[in-house]
Image: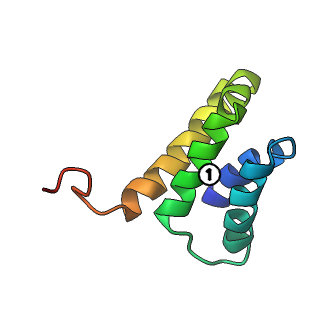
Amino acid sequence: MELKEAVRMILLESAAHPKLLKVARPVYDDLEAGRQVPYQALSAVLEEASGAGVIATLKKQNPNTFEDMVLTLGREIDRQAPVGGLFRR
């Protein structure tokens, strides 16, 4: 699954969640325009989707597609995030 498609899945479920829509729409628009999206923005989309219950809904609808979506987002976040950022003193 491509990153744009993963964000699109969340965006399609965001209509009833204004905060999620506000976070996901610009991320999708940037991906659609071919721009790279920073990992912080991707993390914010996942966090807001989880808080809004969208993640659980997507998992119930199609567990395999859900897994692909989460892995796609997670890989990109992991690829961009600084190594050891959480463990520095």
Tell me residue 85's x, y (percent).
Answer: 26, 57
> Residue placed farthest to the left in the image?
89
- Count the marks: 1
> In front: 84, or 19?
19
> Residue placed farthest to the top in the image?
60
**Residue drawn at the location 62% of the way across and 56% of the way down:** 2
Instruction: Give the vertical position of 15 relative to 67 (above or below).
Output: below
**Amino acid bearing label 1:** Val
**Residue drawn at the location 67% of the way across and 65% of the way down:** 27
Tell me residue 22's x, y (percent).
Answer: 75, 59
- Give the structural element (helix, strand or loop) at label 1: helix
Tell me residue 28's x, y (percent).
Answer: 72, 64
Tell me residue 89's x, y (percent).
Answer: 12, 56
**Residue drawn at the location 36% of the way across and 61% of the way down:** 81
**Residue drawn at the location 16% of the way across and 56% of the way down:** 88
> In front: 88, or 79?
88
Residue 38 lies left or right of residue 89; in this view the side is right
Residue beneath disc 1? 45
> In front: 53, or 10?
53
